[in-house]
Image (cartoon, coloured by chain):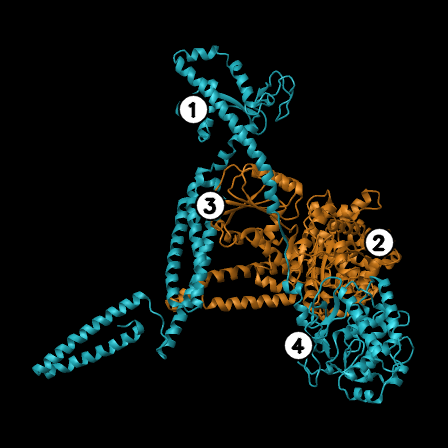
Amino acid sequence: MTLDLSKVSSTYFDKLFVSKKGEQGSMRGKVLLVDKYTTPIISMCYTQSQLLQQDVILVEMIDQQRTSNVKHLDCVVYIKPTKESVSSLVRELKNAHYSKYEIYFNNSVSKSQLEQIAEADEHEVVLQVVELFQDYLIVNNHFYSIYLSGTENFVTDETSSLCSLLLSLKKCPIIKYENNSINLKRLGSEVLYHINSNSQNNLFDDLNQNSASPPLLLLLDRKNDPITPLITPWTYQSMIHELIGINRNIVKVGTPEESLILSDASDAFFQEAMYLNYGDLTDKFQRYVEEYKKQTKSSSVENLKTQNLSELKKLLTKFPEFRKLSNNILKHLNLISELDRQVTVQNLWEVSELQQIIACNLENYSSIKTKMIELLDKPSISTENKVKLVLLYSAKFIGECKSNGDLSLFLHKLSDSSLSDPVITISQSKLIQNFNKIFNFSSSMTGDGNVNNIGRFFGGKKININLFSNSSNANNTTNNIYMQYVPKLNNIVGDIMSKSQSHSSTTFSTLIPDVVSQQYGKSIENLQDIIIYIKGGATYEECRLIHDLNASTDRFEIILGGDDVLNSKVWLDKLYDQVNDASLGSGSGISYATSSDQTRDLL
Amino acid sequence: MDADGSTSKQRNRILGSRAEPITFSYQEPKQPIQESNGGETEDQRTEEGQNLKPGNSESGYKYSSSMEAEDVSPKLAQEAFQNSNIICPICEETMVSLYQLNQHIDDVHQSSDANADGRDTNNRQLSTRRKGKEHVSSADSKGAANSNTRPARRRVKLDVLDSNRGFSISSDTDNEASLSDDPAVSPRVKSGLHLSRRHWRQPSNDIQCYDSRCRRFLNIKNGLVNCRKCGNLFCNIHCNKKVRLRNSDDNEGTQYDNSKNGVWARCCDKCYFEKPDLKLGTQVKMNDLTEEFMRKRALSTDKKELDRIKIQKRFIKLANLHASHYLSQLSSNRLSSAFLSFIRPTDDIFIESEKEIVGPNNWQDDKKITHCNICFTQFNILLRKHHCRLCGRIVCDNPLTEQQPCSMNVPIGSLMNILPDLNYSDQIIANRKKLMEADSPSLFLRFCASCKDVLLSDWKVSQDNVKHETVFQYYDRLLVLKHQLSVLKPRFENSIAEFNAQEANKLRLKVMNISKDFESQVWAFRNTFFANSGDRWVVMQEYADIGGLLQNIYSASSFFLQEFLLDLKELNSKLQSKETATVRKNKDPASDRPKLTKKQIRELRDSLMVMQEQKFLIENTIEKFTKLRKFDELVPLMENRDELDVAIKDLEQQLGEFGF
């Protein structure tokens, strides 16, 4: 494993909190000062008990005012080197409340900032200053998400986050981006500049010395695949996100609302089940419960009475484990029953089947149309699901929609209050009407007009690659109608892995940093490490896809990430905003980035 | 030697005439060299590669010659035919059949020249080429009758060509093609660098794939491929990875090279997974800036240190000045001091000397300053100007500023209280108490906020919140115990693993005691700071402001305790099971008994002594009774003695070497 994100988090944890052996400092309690950027990073990677184990007994925000001096405690500062955080740190150091300070940054810090802090450290309380590079969130061990807060300097933030990812993994990559996206072009050249410029204290030099080929940073744009987030997924993690919603590994479920933590690192069952499809999942869960029952039966209270003292003692020591186990079971039981409820309430079996049929071209146009009308006539199906279906349909049958006026028929049905409740909103209908235009527009803008872009998402399926036809995802697809659709990402990555130039030569531009070309020359061959970034957000379904790809080959290592983790709701909201912006503004040249900016604020 | 020489000559000839378009014929196998000859030098091999490399890019390289065929003696040809090892003369790939060789040359060498590149930055390369040239010319001069100068001349020309080419972009296609093509043909290493083959295993009959999962017999169908890294032979499937290699420094084998000079070459799974990046796994970067930070801090702290000393000195002077004045006043007219202090022209007296202390240059002119130096508010009738007596700057005393006022009137006495160790005059030291209690307006000095901070910075750092003292007393104790436990635990585990029962028992006791201590400390901590309300423990009212802290300390400690006790129990049961196991084992071979603790030995010795004493007594009575002929009493006594004998024997056995 050369791209293991969980290794990153554990290494950084050791660096941050585990005191080195033989140091006297291990005998003191610790305070952790964080800022608003590092709080989610810490909370997603580490648990409270992990921190407590390392004597971190207090976690505070750095910008808080502190009144009392606690010289008995050492202080660990972990902040993003932003202007505000650094000035908070300066204030804290000038008026030191704790005895010793260890300062960690989650990205590279500028010389002037370092100077500023050095000057503030009048009392010489700082023991060490270290740059770590984790300006991103680790979702799974091959899935990251970049957390963007401010809207100003959008590309700069994105670039520095991506660079921190590259640095944390010690990778200095070549950059490939889809050349029909202006935003990617900007991002790509920004990253290239960042790597090439020496402002970073030559951090990017010598990173690849151990690898025979440079890693690849693959920049993709969500707008080149707007379909994937619309399709209802049927694997555990994706379903939780789609039907309940995961926010930074926290799921809120039930009434009263209860927060559950989903983490593949600390939850063995989830780790095994996160990529299973719904059917396999319920089987697995049943087995899990049965195993638990078997174990607990011997230790149930009635049994205890009959057994002698020593065995009783043995069992009692096991009780905490049982409690952990039963809590875990309860958690997943909650989740699965909620999923089940949603599936029935939303009629998802039916909806999803039609989605798959449309997306994968499983039936012909006329039969799909009749099925569409049938579903649209059912009031039991939510408007949102209907909208998703219509969007899929319109993307699939562009010509037919135009010539037969299907869209207006559908729109009519959607605004009929006897058929759909609630009737569609203005932005929804606008989106339906403009869905094709938005994505047509963006590709024709870069002179790529002759390519029938939407059709290609589906067309790609036919040229699908031999490489993974035997991999596990194919097993699912063969007989499961609900898992037919494979995201476009599969084709893209497959092209790169098999080096077939069918798509990539036309759609990708390559940027090679100086350091890389110095080491490897101009020719780049035998790629091994691939870091994918989807601007506009990635889905858990794609994360599963990457997981499968990683499992199917030992020649490649792939990790995936985006600036958001999408489900259909989030994606639709973004799209609504985009059409609304388009109609508000000049109607042309809407920048994809700005609209996604705003949605990000809403989210 | 003779045969060798002629073979190499032959090859040279072939090379020389490669431009002639003659089709490949079955006579080819004459050229292959017997690896087993062993007379061949590395130079020759590399030279070959060199010679072939620059080929005619337009026509590709046709490898054959009818002219050569005429020259070849039938004897040689026969030899070659008999030779079981058929080797491609270009890349020295081992071939199984003529057909295969034929195909190999068509597949691999025809196209490769087009892609051949002259990456001859490598000095070794150049030198070997030169050597090669020498060798050829010497071979020529040795003079086989039909040899001509063409090869040498050509080579010179090629050298020129080479250097003209410089760097070129290599493409992967030829390697890629050969990977997927004829299964029996392994890819030829790019000719720019010729990888050493000294470490290659030679194929023999019935050779198996070196991969432990495969082990199938190698033949044309399965493939017969040397891993370029380790040299072992594999089937096609288990040797289809690629790594970048170069010759190792001693030229005996190959090693990984991740620069552009490395040559992509085929390798086995094992070598692939041992390449540096995969072996190291995920590398995580951190950048320690401490050194740079310390350097920068040293720069600024030096300056600040000077500042602080300066201000401290000024403060001492000021304190001396005012205190002596105050004291002299106090002693001269105790009674009228209050009266005098009204009429005394304080400012006039002091301002001059205060100016002197600060330095006239630093003493800002009232007229020039219109704004406060700290808060930048403009002065007006209500906002008065004040000189800071420590730095001479003009500041305001606006109490409405947000954080702290820009200047304040500070009583010297309380400052002296805070800073008792400064180098005050003897007069002050003698009258310290009086000065501290004094409340005269003449003992107040105006300092600006920044000077005050500098003056008091050391004191501030040393200040601690007294309220938390008890909390941290408990916490420190907990931490010490925790530290001890975490140090002892691995030792305990070790001793168990190493069968050191004595040590283990000792450690067990120690660990148990400390963990009991820890437990009681945790309860004590809870009872001091938490109140029991219902079934939950709530932080007491008076500690509410540090409630989170207390809660965390408590949960951290109890969490640790819980985990630790669980582990400890497991360890104990492990120890017990081990002990019983060893005891059982020891019953059969009495030689290897468990070690006894000192205490045990003492106890055993004691009981042995008692037994022996008893035995002695009984034997005495037996003797007595036999003398007295009380035979009916003798029987139980004898029985007693026998029992004692058994017990003594048992004890002695237990004691073993520790017996008497």
User: To which residue does mark 4 refer?
Assistant: B211
Q: Are marks 1 and 3 on the same chain?
A: yes
User: In what quadrant of the picture does the N terminus of chain A appear?
Assistant: bottom right
Tell me the kind of residue under disc 3.
Leu
* Measured Cα–Cα span from mark 3 to mark 4: 60 Å
* Label 4 environment density (alpha carbons within 10 Å; few <14, some 14–19, many ≥20): some
* Label 2 environment density (alpha carbons within 10 Å; few <14, some 14–19, many ≥20): many
Tell me the kind of residue under disc 1.
Ile
Task: Assign a secondary structure to mark 3.
Answer: helix
* Measured Cα–Cα span from mark 2 to mark 1: 86 Å
Chain for disc number 2:
A
* Label 1 environment density (alpha carbons within 10 Å; few <14, some 14–19, many ≥20): some
Q: Are marks 2 and 1 on the same chain?
A: no
Q: Give the mark nearer the N terminus: 3 vs 4.
A: 4
Task: Assign a secondary structure to mark 1.
Answer: helix
- B322 and A7: which one is in front? B322
Q: Are marks 2 and 4 on the same chain?
A: no
Q: Give the mark nearer the N terminus: 1 vs 3.
A: 1
- Report the side of B284 relative to A315 (left or right): right
Task: Assign a secondary structure to mark 2.
Answer: helix
**For the image shown, how many numbered marks are present on the structure?**
4
Residue B550 marker: 3
The percent position of residue A332, horizontal first and vertical second, equals: 58, 60
Q: Residue at point 44% right, 11% down?
A: B340
